[in-house]
Amino acid sequence: MPLPKSVEVGGVKFRIQRTPKAKGDEDFGEIDTDRRVIYINPSVCKTQKAEWLTLKHEVAHAALHVSGIGYVLKHKDEEALVRMLEHIMIPSLEKLTLLEHS
């Protein structure tokens, strides 16, 4: 399934753009919280699965910023928290949702 054009995080709408934020950018994705844009880099995310995984990662960043927590964390601390959400919390919630609807 292709990515949506936008996603709402805590009541804040973020546009999703499939383009590198900067020329030569090698990151999978990036978020611009001021402009409310999530960038997905198609030259790095070669599959839809990679795009979706990257979107989930960037949505975790968005959630931290919308909540205000992202503004008090150092970059490495925020990234560690986002990776925990990405690899543990989000997959666990997805499994629970599947079980709930089965």
Image (spheres, rainbow, N blue to C red):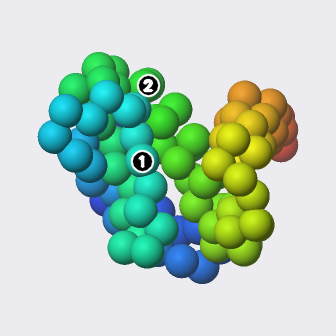
Residue visible at 48% across and 36% down? 54
Label 2 is placed on what type of residue? Lys
Label annotation for residue 17: none
The residue lying toward the viewer, choosing from 10 and 72, is 72
Label 1 is placed on what type of residue? Glu
Pick out the residue farthest to the top: 46
Q: Where residue 45 appears, x then y in whole percent?
A: 33, 26
Residue indicated by mark 1: 30
Q: Where residue 96 appears, x then y in whole percent?
A: 83, 38
Q: Quadrant of residue 3?
A: top left
Q: Quadrant of residue 35?
A: bottom left
28 relative to 57 in the view: left or right: left
Q: CA distance from mark 2 to mark 1?
A: 17 Å
Where 54 falls versus 61 (above or below)?
A: above
Label annotation for residue 49: 2
Q: Which quadrant: the C terminus? A: top right
Q: Can residue 14 be seen at all in this image of the molecule?
A: no
Q: Secondary structure at mark 2?
A: helix
